[in-house]
Amino acid sequence: MESYEFLLFLAIIMISTKLLGLFSRRIHMPAVVGALVAGVVLGPSCLSMITLDGETGVFIEQMAEIGVILLMFNAGLDTDLSELKKNGVASLVTALIGVIVPLVGGFLAYSLYFHTDYSDYGEVLKAVFVGVVLTATSVSITVETLREMGKLKGKVGTTILGAAVLDDIIGIIVLTIVTSLKDTSVSPVSVLLKIVLYFIFIGAIVVVVMKLRGFLEKRDGERRIVIICTALCFILSYISEEFFGIADITGAYFAGLMLCSLKIEEYVARRCEIISYLVFSPVFFASVGLKVTLGGMDASIWIFSIVLLVVAILTKVIGCGLGSRVCGCTNKEALQIGIGMVSRGEVALIVAQKGYASGMLDSVLFAPIVVVVIVTTLLTPILLKMVMKD
């Protein structure tokens, strides 16, 4: 018999994320914090009201994926293109140092805590992979927080967005190189070629969109233009992930970026934000909390989780902050950018899953990674609120 449980789950998620979001604002915190907490409360760590198992779980996961795609599409639409170009070098340097420092920090944290035998190739790879997991950045939470505070289009917001996209590309290269050390069937050269081809592909789409600029702008205010633009977002998300191995949210961000300088931007952004705000974004934020399962961890693993969490926060703040400081940002801006890059989110979980599949991570290390993901995701909007005060 067909189950309609998903309708009940959706209603619970929508109401709980809204109520806790309002409560968060009452205590001067971003609403996204409440939405994340709602997921933790509803999930297996607290009330166990909603599960991600079975067909209903798959449905919620897919809704969440659409939610994060729309979130990044709107971020692209909201981007100030001139500001992004101006901060391009800062974004690149921030991304590079923001990958290197967490990679080294994660390696040292694991190898020192578990007294890694450096003559054991497998153990060294495991330590390296813990560092690889920490290089991941997921700015979807940061994007929503900056939008709430009206800071998305400023120097800090555009640098974070640019660095996050580049961070994703650099992270894929690092992940592939490390994975190829374990699995010789993975070729780093072919992955680098795919990334080059990806940017050529994106460039070709930009040319096509610019050629159609007049056609698109004549239809400003028409509902069909929203359908066309949203379809472009989904198509680029699919192609990015399926054919190039680049995160779908990167494709979504590029789709928004292509349209942000057109006259239709405001209308498309307003319409897309409605469906995102109503259903898809609450499901995405709640799904992050629903993934938290902290049972079965002994004292040693809990201590390592805390160590890894501290390393995860400090390495991004120091690495990304140092990168942006080198490029002329003030100390305050560097701190804001560093904190904006702290959240690991679903990206770290995906990287960890790839490591588990290739045998470089065991099930014991999954729990500490989940702790890092959820705590950094919860802390980022809170810390951003504190350091973004004028």
Image: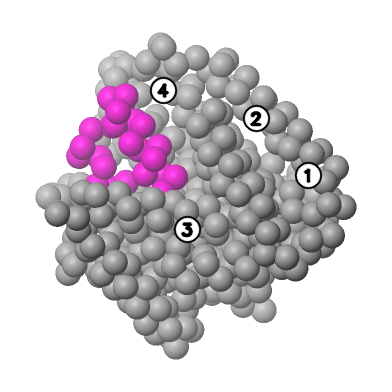
State the residue position of label 4. Answer: 179
Mark 4 element type: helix
Q: Where 23 falls versus 173 (above or below)?
A: below
* Marks 2, 4: nearer the viewer: 2
State the residue lying farthest toward the bottom.
26
Quarter of the image with the C terminus is bottom right
Residue 341 figure quarter? bottom right
Main secondary structure of the magenta stretch? helix
Stretch in magenta: 346-369
Residue positioned 84% across, 60% down in the render: 218
The residue that disc 1 covers is: 209
Q: How far apart are marks 1 and 4 (CA)?
A: 36 Å
* Residue at point 36%, 17% (across, down): 182
> Going from the N terminus, do you reach mark 3 or mark 1 first?
3
Q: Distance between the residues labelled 2 and 4?
A: 21 Å
Q: Which of marks 2 and 3 is nearer the N terminus?
A: 3
Image depth: mark 1 or mark 4 in front: 1
The answer to whether marks 1 and 4 mark residues whose Cβ atoms lie closer than 8 Å is no
* 3 and 1 marks in contact (CB < 8 Å): no
